[in-house]
Image: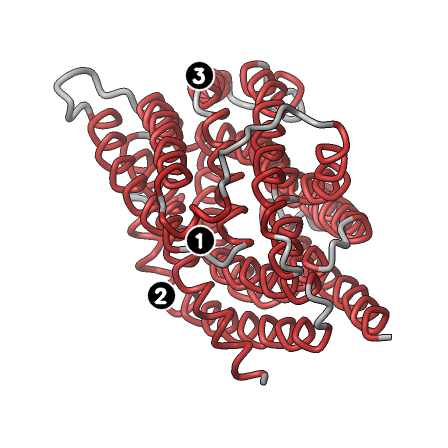
Amino acid sequence: MLAQSCRLIVAHAAPMLVAQLSSMGMMVIDTALLGHYGTEDLAAVAVGGGIYISVVFALVGVLQAVAPAVAHLHGAGRDPEIAGTLQQALWLALLLAMPGVLLLLHPDALLALSRIDPVVEGKARDYLALLAYGLPAVLLYRTFHAFCNALGKPRPLLLISLASTLLHGVLAWLLVTGGWGGEALGILGCGIANAAVGWFSMLCAAAYLLFAPPLRRYRLLADWQRPRRRPLGELLRLGLPIGFSHFVEISSFTLMALFVAQLGATVVAGHRIVANLAAICYMLPLALAIATLAQVGQAAGARDWRRAELSIGAGLLLAGSLSTLLGLLLWLIAEPLAAAYTDDPAVRAVVLALIGYVAFYQIFDAWQTIAAHALRGYRITLAPMFVHVFCFWGVGLFGGWWLAFHARQPMGVAGFWLASLLSLVLAALLLGALLWRAMRAFRE
């Protein structure tokens, strides 16, 4: 039975992993292009990109409520209700886009948290303003993304992601380097490419919803509903804690980048590269966690608690073992990875000094990610949010700030990475305990 659960999760997670790595390829492309274009532009994308990811992931987290909602309906055999849930989630995406755009256009509060070189800050502001144009499309697409995962249909996400990354690579290269025949735009070229690709992905998702044969029986866009208070309230009840968890997790890295900015452009650039590698590695446990959520949610909807437990065990086993191997690989190929990202010897030295933390980081990040998503499959989202706040802001960010700047022997940027590692160990233990209690409660 455990082997069968492993096969189901791998079958779902494999295309999701490729899709997510492909999407992460856009960040890799931006980082690599700007790493060879200029250190100031690379530092600006570290700061601006961190703010953008924090805003987007917080809003996308709220929209992730559609995943357990749809998974439960599907597992319970209530497929006629799925269309209404999706339509309300799309309305919610449009509503959330309004504050998101305002935050990207006016990031003063976040930028004021640290002393940033004026040139770097100006470039980061321009980058965020361009990304704001693509935010509504990104949120609509991510709603579609969560919906497909809840039904166990990752293939369209894979195809759209591959096409989007290819388009982004071409656009970013042309605009950043001046290959289009005009001025080399640097970070502005990355911003334009990201916004354009966001709308491309959204249009592809709309076409799939309208014309894909596997979705016709759900009549997803028939009898279109206006926004309704009760279903929107239920989505917000589930989604707000998820969104805040996402915000806490991602903003800890954003704020880390802002605090590190006072250490100089070289340290910021090296930190950006290491954070980029950590984010790429995170795609493996995240793909497995998304698949685990879908399996747990469908099993919970059918009240098949044994199947839910087997899915959780399979997710933890796969994520823990594979992330351990990935961390080891990252450690072994650290030098060529650093060389691929930058030509600057000083930036490369920062990368090599930090990459060991990431190698260990992967193991505990995998366990806490699976546990959090499994709890969401049970529709438990509030308690995990409090765990994330305590661990990522309390231990990771505040502890990192103290180690970096105020310990007896300040560690600099390494202090933030050590504290982040400790925060993940604690999160894995606490979320694991919550998950064990939930499993026992539902079994009884």
Q: Position of residue 402 (x, y in %)?
A: 74, 44
Q: Nearer the viewer, residue 282 or 287?
A: 287
Locate residue 252: give its quadrant.
top right
Q: Amino acid at mark 3?
A: Asp
Precedes in sequence: disc 3 or disc 1:
3
Precedes in sequence: disc 2 or disc 3:
3
The image shows residue 291, relative to residue 38, as above or below, that is below
Locate residue 317: give its quadrant.
bottom right
Precedes in sequence: disc 1 or disc 2:
1
Find numbered disc 1 in the image and state the secondary structure of the residue it sits on: helix
Discs 2/3, front: 3
Does the residue at mark 3 contact the one at mark 1 (Cβ under 8 Å)?
no
Neighbor class of circle 1 (other Cα within 10 Å; few <14, some 14-19, many 20+) is some
Residue tagged 1:
280
Residue tagged 2:
333
Q: Looking at the rendered structure, which numbered label has been put on residue 126?
A: 3
